[in-house]
């Protein structure tokens, strides 16, 4: 439906969508809630990185909430990046955002982003490959596979992101990621293995552990 209308509201803001991007989900607003709790100082010039920015809903919402912050949004899909660019223009934050093409499966990807960052957010693909065809048809048939497919156990992207996190997150900074149902403990374990300090997970409105954060 959102693809037909061409727009979906997220955190009370309008986001344009196309079949190249995941439709922003209410569950992902838990990422914003977690960040606002961890970083209550709204007037600081935070440096923010969003891995797999898609429509830009996480990064651009945070740039609206933190008017002095600057951000980088990375995505492997050029079509998603142009959608995020349009949304940044509409929301009036384009002067504070850099949208970068890149792929966290490629060696050296994290070194090109100009870090470290006070905050890294991500809602990476986290569905296990074998489960995608069994999802509701509006998801399985219409949303981009690159936005969904997390590999054989759903955790491929978290492994790569956790391994890069110590270099990407500044001392005292945070990484905050959305996770699929039942993945919170595994993802917290990946951050701990990388040397970060995981925090207690945040639940979404359905009571599911939806967001995992760790401190550098
Ligand atoms: C689940 S979507 C999230 C989009 C948006 N951040 C949101 O919360 O609605 C994941 C995004 O990661 C991007 N992505 C998937 N694999 C990637 C990779 N290896 N490197 C960079 N971006 C990737 C996809 O193109 C997609 O936009």
Image (cartoon, rainbow, N blue to C red):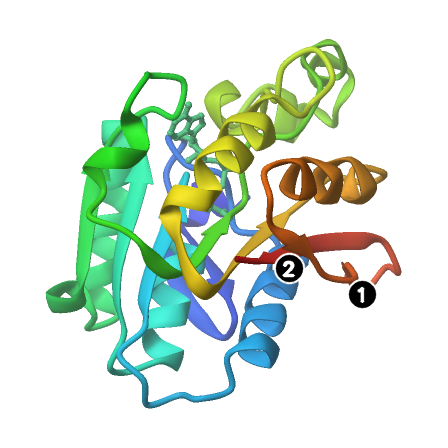
Q: Determine whether the residue tagged by mark 2 lies in a helix, strand or loop.
A: helix
Which residue corresponds to the image point at 46% horizontal and 65% vertical from the top-left? Answer: 173
In-image side of 182 versus 195 (left or right): right
The x and y percentages for residue 112 are: 20, 35
Please rate how many residues cluster around mark 1, counting C-alpha atoms within 10 Å: few if below 14, some from 14 to 19, many from 20.
few
> Which one is nearer the viewer's eye here, 112 or 28?
112
Q: Please tell me which residue lies in front, 203 or 161.
A: 161
Q: How many marks?
A: 2
Q: Earlier in the sequence, mark 1 or mark 2?
A: 2
- The residue lying at 37 percent from left, 30 percent from top is 20
Disc 2 designates what residue? 26
Name the residue: 70% across, 11% down. Answer: 152
Quarter of the image where one finds residue 150: top right
Q: Nearer the viewer, residue 2 or 33?
A: 33
User: Residue 33: horizontal and vertical position, in percent?
Assistant: 61, 73
Q: Secondary structure at mark 1?
A: loop
Label 2, residues with CA under 10 Å away: few <14, some 14-19, many ≥20: few
- Residue 51 horizontal/vertical position (percent): 41, 42
Instruction: Tell me whether circle 1 and circle 2 mark residues in contact (CB < 8 Å).
Output: yes
Q: Where's ligand 1: which quadrant? A: top left
Between the residue at mark 1 and the residue at mark 2, the CA separation in whole angstroms equals: 9 Å
Between 70 and 5, the residue placed more toward the observer is: 70
Residue 173 falls left or right of residue 16: right
Say which residue label 1 marks. 205
> As displayed, is residue 38 above or below residue 139?
below
């Amino acid at each position: 439906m959102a693809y037909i209308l061409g727009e979906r509201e997220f955190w009370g803001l309008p986001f344009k969508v196309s079949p190249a991007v995941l439709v922003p989900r209410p569950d992902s607003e838990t990422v914003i809630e977690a960040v606002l709790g961890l970083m209550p100082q709204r007037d600081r010039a935070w440096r923010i990185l969003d891995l797999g920015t898609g429509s830009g809903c996480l990064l651009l919402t945070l740039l609206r909430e933190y008017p002095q912050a600057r951000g980088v949004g990375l995505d492997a899909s050029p079509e998603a990046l142009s959608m995020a660019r349009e949304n940044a223009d509409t929301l009036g934050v384009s002067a504070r955002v850099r949208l970068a093409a890149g792929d966290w499966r490629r060696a050296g990807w994290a070194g090109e982003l100009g870090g470290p960052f006070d905050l890294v957010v991500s809602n990476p693909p986290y569905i296990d490959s074998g489960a995608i065809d069994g999802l509701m048809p509006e998801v399985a048939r219409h949303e981009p596979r690159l936005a969904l497919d997390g590999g054989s156990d759903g955790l491929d992207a978290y492994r790569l992101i956790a391994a890069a996190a110590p270099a990407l997150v500044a001392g005292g900074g945070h990484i905050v990621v959305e996770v699929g149902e039942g993945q919170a403990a595994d993802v917290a374990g990946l951050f701990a293995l990388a040397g970060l300090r995981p925090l207690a997970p945040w639940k979404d409105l359905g009571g599911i552990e939806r967001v995992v954060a760790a401190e550098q």
